[in-house]
């Protein structure tokens, strides 16, 4: 199976998951198909409660909490209140405390390389999605160049799921497609080309691209084809 | 030089911050006559400034404000969805690959290179953070400026006519356009990159620091 096909399968599983235990299994599967040492998704909901899943060892998690490393972890400090993806090499590891923290993290198996996607959700919800691995700079450059877009997408797929766990959340609130999005996806499903869809809907191809992209995001799909398949399987469109 | 600063870090450069909000009042209230609120200190601020946006600011060699713009991801609250949804077919634009760009502002007397430099900063964001599109609201008078700097948006929808026409537009990244914008800004790609790294931490500089 190609990486894309594997990702689609795991994303389907993520989509259907309704417990933290399944999120844990899903993130372990993702780490495996990307061949990285660690993958972690950690979020704080709008009520301020913290949740997480990931592949760090229990020992490291316990140690981290005991020592309250949130205060000195350069990844947390450098990503908190941000919304751009961050390569760990761009963070400030220069302080003595940060260097000691890094050395200790490494003893617990945290990689020397990392890539973190901070996400800001609605009503104060926020999350960090991290991939970490042990390798040299050149290997890591190649990995992030190749997979950055997919990793950002997976990060947001986890966050869409986390938002479903929000207290007081209305069911299916964020997942409904607007009439324009349904029209666009339906015509694509019928085999129309983008140009034909745009012409049929009397919109430009750029506008169409925005509709498709927002529908793709709402559906947690990897690409347009996947978005069409998901919309059909959920009965959102009828062809 | 171009600086990329999150709202929570603006306090580190108070003079530049105050000048930016004053220049915004001058552009949007005084010159364009938009219904924006200006406080007692002469600063134009709105609720999106409270959401810790990312500002891209052109700082003149003397430290003053030459121009600026403001970014927020469309996965959170943004102006196009909160106020202009009727211009995008009722489709809320939401994607980590689309950021909103608002309050594109030039100080009085800023040369055309400033507008081009800001666009170049936008290009750096797109290229480095995997953002495919910027979406934003602009009025008829900006059309000429965007054309002049070689970065015209695709119009998604408009309301009103003539000078008071308001549109929602879409910009996409195109490496060729970036080169043209850099040329108009009179800046090299290397320098632009260096400024970007200075704001977001440079990987190479960091490694050197760690060995020291």
Image (cartoon, coloured by chain):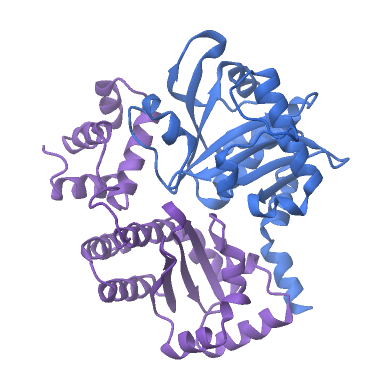
> Is residue B158 in view from this perspective?
yes
Residue A188: quarter of image: top left
Residue B64: quarter of image: top right
Q: Is residue A218 above or below residue A159?
A: above
Looking at the image, which residue sits at the far top?
A: B162
For image coordinates 69% across by 18% down, the residue present is B31
Residue B209: quarter of image: bottom right
Colour chosen for chain B: blue
Indicate left or right for B76 with B184 as reference: left
Looking at the image, which residue sits at the far front?
A: B40
Q: Is residue A60 above or below residue A225?
A: below
For image coordinates 48% across by 87% down, the residue present is A60
Q: Quadrant of the N terminus of chain B?
A: top right
Can you give x and y, in whole percent of width and height, for residue A225 in the image? Answer: 25, 46
Can you give x and y, in whole percent of width and height, for residue A74 in the image? Answer: 62, 72
A27 or A178, which lies in front? A178
Q: Quadrant of the C terminus of chain B?
A: bottom right
Can you give x and y, in whole percent of width and height, for residue A148 in the image? Answer: 47, 59
Chain identifier of the purple chain: A
Looking at the image, which residue sits at the far right?
A: B62
For image coordinates 69% across by 50% down, the residue present is B193
Indicate left or right for A155 with B142 as reference: left
């Amino acid at each position: 199976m190609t990486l894309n096909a594997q990702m689609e399968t795991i994303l389907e599983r993520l989509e259907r998951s309704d417990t933290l235990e399944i999120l844990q299994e899903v993130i372990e599967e993702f780490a495996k198909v990307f061949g990285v040492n660690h993958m972690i998704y950690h979020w704080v909901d709008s009520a301020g409660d913290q949740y997480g899943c990931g592949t760090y060892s229990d020992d490291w998690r316990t140690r981290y909490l005991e020592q309250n490393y949130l205060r000195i972890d350069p990844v947390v400090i450098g990503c908190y209140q941000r919304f751009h993806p961050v390569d760990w090499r761009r963070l400030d590891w220069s302080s003595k405390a940060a260097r000691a923290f890094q050395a200790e993290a490494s003893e617990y198996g945290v990689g020397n390389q990392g890539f973190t996607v901070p996400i800001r959700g609605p009503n104060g919800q926020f999350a960090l999605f991290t991939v970490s691995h042990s390798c040299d700079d050149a290997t890591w450059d190649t990995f992030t160049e190749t997979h950055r877009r997919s990793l950002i997408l997976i990060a947001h797929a986890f966050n869409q799921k986390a938002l479903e766990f929000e207290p007081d959340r209305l069911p299916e609130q964020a997942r409904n497609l607007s009439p324009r999005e349904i029209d666009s996806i339906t015509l694509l499903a019928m085999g129309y080309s983008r140009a034909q869809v745009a012409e049929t809907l009397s919109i430009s191809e750029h506008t169409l691209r925005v509709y498709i992209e927002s529908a793709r995001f709402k559906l947690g799909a990897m690409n347009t084809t996947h978005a069409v398949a998901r919309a059909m399987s959920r009965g959102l469109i009828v062809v | 030089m171009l600086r990329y600063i999150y709202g929570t870090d603006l306090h580190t450069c108070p003079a530049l911050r105050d000048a930016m909000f004053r220049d915004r009042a001058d552009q949007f209230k005084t010159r364009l006559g938009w219904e924006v609120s200006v406080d007692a200190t002469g600063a134009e601020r709105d609720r999106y400034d409270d959401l810790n946006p990312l500002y891209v600011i052109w700082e003149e060699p003397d430290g003053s404000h030459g121009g600026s713009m403001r970014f927020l991801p469309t996965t959170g609250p943004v102006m196009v969805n909160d106020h202009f949804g009727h211009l995008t077919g009722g489709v809320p634009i939401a994607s980590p690959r689309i950021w909103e760009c608002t309050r594109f502002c030039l100080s009085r007397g800023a040369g055309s290179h400033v507008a081009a430099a800001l666009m170049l900063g936008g290009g750096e964001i797109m290229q480095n953070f995997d953002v495919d599109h910027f979406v934003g609201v602009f009025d008829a008078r900006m059309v000429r400026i965007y054309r002049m700097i070689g970065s015209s948006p695709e119009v998604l929808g408009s309301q009103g006519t003539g000078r008071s026409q308001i549109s929602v537009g879409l910009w996409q990244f195109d490496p060729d356009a970036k080169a043209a914008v850099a040329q108009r800004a009179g800046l090299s790609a290397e320098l632009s990159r260096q400024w970007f790294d200075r704001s977001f931490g440079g990987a190479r500089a960091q490694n050197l620091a760690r060995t020291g």
